[in-house]
Every structure is written in structure tokens, then in C-alpha cells.
Image: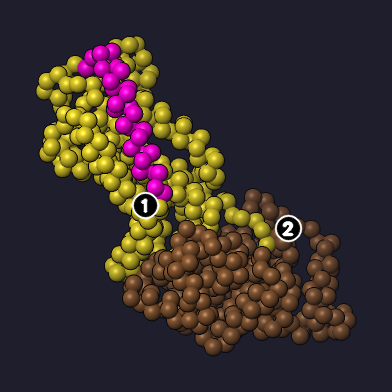
Amino acid sequence: MNTVHAFNAFSALSSREIGKFLRQKGRLFSALVRPALWLLVFAAGFQNVFGVAVIPPYESYIEYEVYITPGLLCMVILFNGMQSSLTMVYDREVGVMRLLLTAPLPRWYILFCKLMAGTLLSLLQVYAFLVICWLFDVDLPVYGLLSALPAFIISALMLGALGLLLSVSVKQLENFAGMMNFVIFPMFFMSPALYPLWKLEEAGAELVYQIAQFNPFTHAVELVRFALYGQLNSESLFVVAGFFVVFFILAVRGYDPQRGSMSQKGRKGG
Amino acid sequence: MNTPFALELVDVSKSYGRLKALNKVSLDIKPAQFVGLLGQNGAGKSTLFQLLTGLFNSDEGQLRVCGHDISRDPIKALSSLGVVFQQSTLDLDLTVGGNLKFHCLLHGLSRKQADLRIDSELERFSMQEIRNTVVRNLSGGNRRKVELIRALLHEPKVLLMDEATVGLDPESRKSLVNHVLTLCKEREIAVLWSTHIIEEVQAADSVIVLDKGTILAESSPEQLQMESEKPSLTLADAFSQLIDKNKNIGVVYE
């Protein structure tokens, strides 16, 4: 595979994903409605229930809607990561996956292109949601739009790679819906997206607190939260980057005809 | 290419659990040779195609496309292969042109090269007018033709047709077979045509009969008929006779 071939393949795979996203007109809308409801309804209702102490990166008291915005941005990325891998399951069901896997390209590269296309779509939705935040006067620093870009990218890669990994073992779209419930909601609720983790510890939920510490989504939220204020949370960066590498390697291994679980699942037919 | 064979299989075996789907299968195909692969459902044809396309690896044996081993050098092997799968692999939401261009780019062609080849192949099949039609709106016969056109765009040396006529009416089936026969001779493409419909391989250079993962016979259609117990039998009868003879032999388990 030379550079031109690699570029052409990337362009084909990413433009197909983006084209599909643009044709599904309701997808952007539903991707934005979900976090917008949390922001406008949940945050308004719980403004006075969840008092948030001054914790880094914040230097003074902040409104609850400001606190939950990084978590909601990561929620957008998480949902898109899972949705992108849903397209892998869909491609397998309609047969397009066969075409992809028999293209003269390394499998890791095909998966990487899929991942990058998903990351582009995540960024598009994240910035669209930031516009909503701005329209509803959520107090975020303007420079944060740029300083958080690398954090959005690495988080999108990590969560997209998780989706790819899940798509290895999910054979039908119906099963995937169940998997989303078992992955998305636990990841989201056992993270500092809606409340700081020390609140869990304070409430005596020690086990949930410990699980949340190991939750990669926790670190994606913290990475984005700090990056929005131009600060680097190096521990979170290390964890998110580490999980990205591990998830991606396992996904590539899963799609390897020699070693992965795919190798045991041939279609018996004619 | 240092080998006279476009496609070469040596003692290839594949098992699913304890069931042996392919048992030491060997075959070779030269350029411009049209080989029919006959077998009933469950004979191992699809498994063979999955191994040939690198979707899965064989447990034993070697598979080479234009001299390139599919498990050791899959990229070179796959770039010489054109495949029409039994199940449609077209993106139903894209236009015909969109599907064809997607394939070209995956095979490393530039957008300009892709456009030229797409135009020329569509013209050859007299299908220029459907270039901008969304695939979902095409008939089954036209979808198959589009898949054949797509398989030819990167100028493969070997064309694999995995029960490509499934769901087609007899006229479309005949037309597809004739197209591929012509292409095989004109462009010197080696063709492996898998089917359980005997008439489709009547004009083949050679026919391979696969049953329970084992090759029962390999010869020209005429020779296959001659070698049967009654030389007056049709190819279909000769095939049935071979399968019947093999009936008492059970499925192979490891």
C-alpha cells in the first residue's frame, strides 16, 4: 500500500461515513437533543440540589450547567462512537463488510480509517453542541473551543475504538442495542459527568467510586473538563491514550482472520 | 508471476469445530481458463471462497493467487482478485457510480482513473444510463451486473463468482454466464464459477465436483459425461451419479 492508495482509501471510507451521516437527517438532531435535554432540563431542575464545591480546574463557584457540560460533550462522543461501530454491524449485515475486508488494504488500516471517519463526525457534533451551549449562555471560555480540540480527538478515538472492539463480537443490530445499554449508561453514570466522584465516596458508594476511577469515560470527561480551561490533566491523558491503544489493538486482533474471534465464525453454506 | 497458474490450492483443509468443511482440496486454474465449481448446499463451496478471499485462514495447505500466498501476502493476492459474492455487497443507499468509485478508491485507483474505467465498463455492459441510479432502485439482474462490473474495475487476473446467479431469472442468468465467458477469453482472466446449477458450467473449460469438502472429480464437462457409467448421460446426470456414489460416505469429522 503506497501513500496515494492509503489516501484514496481513507477518502473513500470517510466520505462514505460522512455521506451516510448527512443522508440520515434526523441523526444530528437526535445526537443534539439528548445532551440538550440534560443541559436545559436536568441541569435546571437540579441546579440547587447538586451543590458543586470549587474543584480544579474551576477557580471559583460555577453553575451546575457549566459543571455538566464537559460530561455532555463526552456523552455526544460516546454515543457517536457506539453509533459508528453500529455501522460496522450494519455493514456486516448488508454484506458491505465483505467488500471492505477483501480490499487490498491492511485490516488495521481499514479499521483506522473507519475510526478517523467516526472521529470527524464526533467533532462535528461536539462543536454543534457547543453552539447550543453558547446559545443558552453556558459560561465557557472562548479559547476552550480550541484548547479542548485535542482532548475531543483523543477521547473520540478511544471511545470509537471501544465501539470497534464491541462490533467484533456483536453479530446482529438487535444485539447491539442491548450492548449499548450495558455499555453507555454504566459508563456515563459511573463517571464525573453529572457529579464529582468524591460525592459518591461521601455517599458511601465505595464500590461504585472505585469502579468509576477505572472507567475510561471518567478520564475522557476530566481530560475535556481541564482542556476547556486550557489546562492539561496528564493522568487522564495517559489513561485515555492507553485505553485507545489497548481497544484498537484488541479490535484489530478481533478482525484478524488468523487470530481473532472472526476466524472461528465462518459462514457454512454452499 | 513465476507460476503458470493464476490460482493454486494445495492440500487446503478447514474445519469448523470438529466438522471438516474442506479436506485436503487441491486445484489450479490457468489464465483464460473458466472452471466451474459444482457442489450441493453444504459441499464446502462457500468455505472455499472465504479462504480464497482471505476472510478466514485455512487450517492447513496453501492458497496462492498469481503466486502470492493469501495468508502471507494478502494485499498482493487480493489486488489480483475480483469477487462477486453470493450475498450482495453493494451499498444500497449509494448510486451505481458511487458504489463503483468506492471500490476503485479502495483498490488504489485515482478518482480520474476510476471515472475513466467506470465509464468504459458501464459502456461495455450498455449500462451508462444507470450510473446515477441509487442501487436500491435497481432490479436483481442489474445489481448482479453492477457487482460484476465492480469486480472488473481494478483489472483482476482472477475472477471468483460465488453462486452469483442466485435470485436471477433464467434469461439474466444466461446473459451473466455469457458475459463472464467472453471476458475470460478476451481479457485472459481465470474464472472460478461456483454454482449448483449444472447448465451454468456446461461451457466451462473444466468442472470440479465438490462434495462433503472433498473433490470428487475434475475434468472437462464432456469428459465428466464420458466417464460416467452411461456416457449418454447429461452433465446433470453425471453430477448426480457422482454425488449418489459419495452418499454412503459420511461427513468427515476430525
Q: In the rendered structure, find residue B252 and report the number of the disc placed on it.
A: 2
Q: On screen, B229 above or below B243?
A: below
Note whether residue B62 is visible: no
Residue drawn 62% across the image and 61% down it: B47
Q: Is residue A107 magenta?
A: no
Please identify which colour was used for chain B in the image: brown
| Magenta residues, dominant SS class | helix
Spatial CA distance of label 2 from label 1 is 51 Å
Q: Nearer the viewer, residue A178 or B245?
A: A178
Residue drawn 14% across the image and 24% down it: A58
Horizontally, residue B88 falls left or right of residue B218, namely left
Residue drawn 49% across the image and 53% down it: A91
Cβ–Cβ below 8 Å for labels 2 and 1? no
Amino acid identity at mark 1: Leu
Chain identity for the colour yellow used in the image: A
> Which of the two discs, 2 and 1, sits closer to the camera?
1
Q: Position of residue A88 (x, y in %)?
A: 46, 50
Chain bearing tag 2 is B
Q: In the rendered structure, find residue A22 and report the number of the disc placed on it.
A: 1
Q: Which residues are magenta?
A: A24-52
